[in-house]
Image (tube, rainbow, N blue to C red):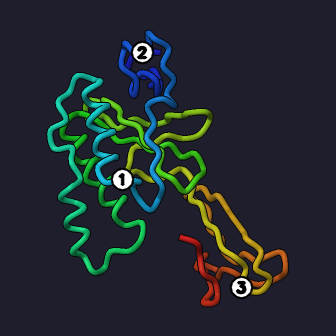
Amino acid sequence: MTELEKPEKLEELVLTPDERARGVQVDRVVFTMDWTGEDHPGQLAAFVAGRLRAFGTEPAGIDTDAVRRAAEDDPTLRRGDLPVRQLDHLSAALADLGGTLLVWESGTDAYELLVALTGGREPAGLLHEGLPVRPWGSEPEQTLVSLNCPDCSQMLVWELPPTETLADEHCDCGTALFDAEGHPLPNVTLHP
C-alpha cells in the first residue's frame, strides 16, 4: 500500500504532534453543541480558533458575530437554523485556511465537532469509537428518521442508508406511515 492509498487516521488530523506524543485522546478536542445552538455566544468560534492556534495557524475569519447579527434580522429563522448557518460559515472559513470542520455522527441530536488540518483535501472513511466522522456539509452515511405513530403514539426510529427509503412502511399497530415513494402520509409528522 502506497502512502497515498494509506487510510487517514482521525488522530493524525485532529491532534497536534505534541498532543499525540502526550497521549491526548480525541475526546479532549471535541466541541459539543446542542442542535439549538451554543450555550453562550461565541463558544463555537472560540473553539475553532483555539484548535487552529494549537496547530500554529492564525484563525483569520473565524468569527460568527456577523452570522448571528444577520440571523437576528431574518424573520424566517427557526429554532436550530442559527447553528447550521454558523457551521456553514466556519466550514468555509476553515477551508480557506486549509482546514476542515468535522462532525462526529455519535447518534445524538447534538453537533459533536472537530477541527482538522487537511490542506484542502476532504477526508473520508474516518471513524471515532466505531462511528462515522465526516466533513460538515457532506452527506451523512445514514439518515435518522423518527416520528410518533398518529394512532398509537408509539415512537418509531429508523437509521437509513442513502439508498433506502421507508416506502409503504407501517407502524406495528398497522397504521400506514409512508406512501409508495417513501414520503410521509399527510397525518404523519416527522421529528426535526
> As drawn, is 156 to the left or to the right of 62?
right
- Disc nearer the start of the sequence (3/1): 1
Disc 2 marks which amino acid? Thr
Q: Secondary structure at mark 2?
A: loop
- Label 3 sits on residue: 150
- Disc nearer the start of the sequence (2/3): 2
Is residue 68 positioned above or below 120 on the image?
below
Q: Residue furthest bottom?
A: 186
- Measured as percent of width and height from the top left, residue 55 is found at 28, 23
How far apart marks 2 and 3 lie (CA) works out to 55 Å
Q: Secondary structure at mark 3?
A: loop
- Name which quarter of the figure residue 118 lies in: top left
Q: Residue furthest right?
A: 173
Q: 10 Å neighbourhood of mark 1: few (<14), some, or many (≥20)?
A: few
Disc 3 marks which amino acid? Pro
Q: At x 38% / y 48%, what residue is drawn?
A: 136
How far apart marks 1 and 2 lie (CA) works out to 45 Å
- Disc nearer the start of the sequence (1/2): 2
Q: 10 Å neighbourhood of mark 2: few (<14), some, or many (≥20)?
A: few
Q: At x 59% / y 75%, what residue is drawn?
A: 190
Q: Residue furthest front?
A: 40
Disc 1 marks which amino acid? His
Q: How many marks?
A: 3
- Residue 2, which numbered label? 2
Q: Marks 2 and 3: CB-CB under 8 Å?
A: no
- Measured as percent of width and height from the top left, residue 73 is found at 21, 74
- Name which quarter of the figure residue 185 lies in: bottom right
- Residue 40, which numbered label? 1
Q: 10 Å neighbourhood of mark 3: few (<14), some, or many (≥20)?
A: some
Is residue 9 or residue 113 the one in the foreground?
A: 113
> As drawn, is 117 to the left or to the right of 139?
left
